Image: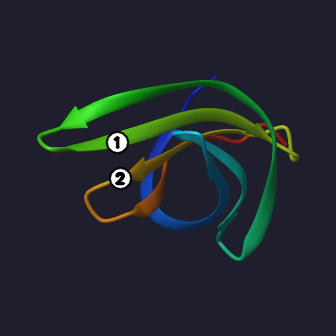
């Protein structure tokens, strides 16, 4: 399995509740992906800000890493491994 670095802005529908972030869907290249499972997440400190990374599987059985940056409140598609 080979991941490709992308680092493109994406649109994400997510739930912010009780100090946690739960991504639900995201849009990339004109297609909406429903998130089936979050395999893991981690936080990277960036000075006063943080980057929240999510490793996930979408409805297409493809693997993605998406990232939320508190510096600009933007989401990015960081990496992708397309299976299907």
Split into 4 quadrants, where in the image is the C terminus?
top right
**Disc 2: CA contacts within 10 A as few (<14), some (14-19) or many (>=20):** some
Residue bearing the label numbered 1: 51
* Coordinates of residue 70 in the picture (x, y in percent): 33, 54
| Residue at the bottom extreme of this rendering | 30
Compared with 6, 44 (above or below) is above
Where residue 22 appears, as percent x and y from the top left, is 66, 43
**x 23%, y 33%: residue:** 45
| Residue marked by disc 2 | 69
Q: Is residue 19 left or right of residue 28?
A: left
Tag 1 and tag 2, C-beta contact below 8 Å: yes
Relative height, residue 52 to residue 72 (above, below): above
Marker disc for residue 79: none
- Distance from label 1 to label 2 (Cα)? 4 Å
Q: Quadrant of the N terminus?
A: top right
Q: Is residue 31 left or right of residue 73?
A: right
Residue furthest out toward the front: 18
Is residue 50 rendered to the left or right of residue 31? Answer: left
- Determine the residue positioned at 59% across, 40% down: 18
Q: Is residue 24 above or below residue 40?
A: below
Of the residues under marks 1 and 2, which one precedes in the sequence?
1
Q: Give the structural element (helix, strand or loop) at label 2.
A: strand
Q: Seen in the image, is 7 located left or right of residue 38?
A: left
Which residue is found at the position 47% from the left and 36% from the top? 53
């Amino acid at each position: 399995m080979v991941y490709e670095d992308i680092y493109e802005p994406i649109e994400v529908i997510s739930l912010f509740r009780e100090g946690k972030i739960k991504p639900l869907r995201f849009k990339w290249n004109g297609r909406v992906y429903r998130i089936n499972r979050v395999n893991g997440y981690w936080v990277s400190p960036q000075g006063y800000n943080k980057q929240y990374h999510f490793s996930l599987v979408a409805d297409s059985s493809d693997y993605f890493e998406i990232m939320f940056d508190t510096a600009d409140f933007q989401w990015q598609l960081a990496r992708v491994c397309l299976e299907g």
